[in-house]
Image (tube, coloured by chain):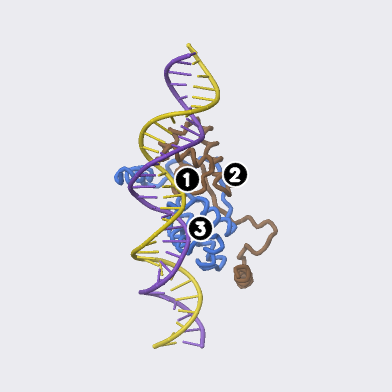
Chain colours: A brown, B blue, C purple, D yellow
Amino acid sequence: MLVRTPAEFGAVLRDRRKKLKLDQSTFAKRIGVSRQWVIEVEHGHARAELGLILRALDALDIRLEAGTEQTPARGATRPAVDINAIVAKARKKKA
Amino acid sequence: MLVRTPAEFGAVLRDRRKKLKLDQSTFAKRIGVSRQWVIEVEHGHARAELGLILRALDALDIRLEAGTEQTPARGATRPAVDINAIVAKARKKKA
DNA sequence: GCGCTATGTCAGCGATCGATGACATTCGGC
DNA sequence: GCCGAATGTCATCGATCGCTGACATAGCGC
């Protein structure tokens, strides 16, 4: 599943937790956080600590993969060759 | 690439940023954070906000996927040290 | 009805985040 | 040598995190 927002992280975590038949308290203890944290994160807390989130994912055997291969037909995100073009575009965009 | 730690997130981000020929300031402005934040995150800041990290990934067109398909050989991919234990210990020590 | 479990809510608190702004260092070109 | 760009460091400061602990609600079995 593609994850792009904190809310999605929450959904993924809650889902997996339930699938594993764990209640929030048990889950929290496993990760090493408070039950309160679990509740908030499952509700999509955007300011959760990256490290804790990763621990949670790990505790539930959720694999996280980062990739850039998603160049459907847009163009330009791929630094295959035209570095200069990319630089130029980035600069213009910025300004 | 598989991401399991804040440091790896930092590496991924810095990598992509450089590939896109963006300097930290420009990158920071794009995401909407301070340059300081970029520096810390690229250095593996564990307590970075989940939301900001996601924004950064998005700004660099990095796709993030969560999956449980194949349980990653518990034991092989596992780091030699027990991170959870360390963190737990640190927390207790503090209090 | 009563107890038990699971989830969610509230308030308070210390620790830390992320922002700002100045400064140091390194590298390249002139 | 000097300048500009890029990165990293330092100190300060308001806002917020995550923790604790208690309470409220809902479902279930007896």
Mark 1 burial class by Cα count in 10 Å: few <14, some 14-19, many 20+: many
Q: Is residue A81 visible?
A: no
Q: Chain of mark 3?
A: B
Q: Is residue A72 left or right of residue B48?
A: right
Sequence-wise first label, 2 or 1:
2
Q: Amino acid at mark 3?
A: Val
Single out the mark in the foreground, 1 or 3.
1
10 Å neighbourhood of mark 3: few (<14), some, or many (≥20)? many
Amino acid type at image mark 2: Met
Residue lying at the far right of the rendered structure: A73
Query: Can residue B19 be seen by looking at this rendering?
Result: yes
Q: Quadrant of the C terminus of chain A?
A: bottom right
- The structure residue drawn at horizontal position 55% and vertical position 68%, both measured from the top left corner, is B21
Which residue is found at the position 58% from the left and 53% from the top?
Answer: B63
Asked if labels 3 and 1 touch by Cβ distance under 8 angstroms, the answer is no
Q: Position of residue B14 (x, y in %)?
A: 50, 62
Where residue A41 appears, as percent x and y from the top left, is 50, 42
Where is mark 2, residue-wise? Answer: A1
Image height of B41 relative to B67, above or below = below
Residue at x 58%, y 59% (from the top left corner): B59
Apparent side of residue A69 relative to residue B76 in the rendered image (left or right):
right
- How many discs mark residues in the rendered view? 3
What chain does mark 2 sit on?
A
> x and y percent of residue B11 in the render?
48, 58
In the rendered structure, find residue A53 and report the number of the disc placed on it: 1
B54 or C4: nearer the viewer? C4
Q: Residue at x 51, y 62 (%)?
A: B15
Q: What residue is shown with label 3?
A: B12
Secondary structure found at label 2 = loop
Q: Is residue A59 above or below residue A87?
A: above
**Which of labels 2 and 1 is toward the front?**
1
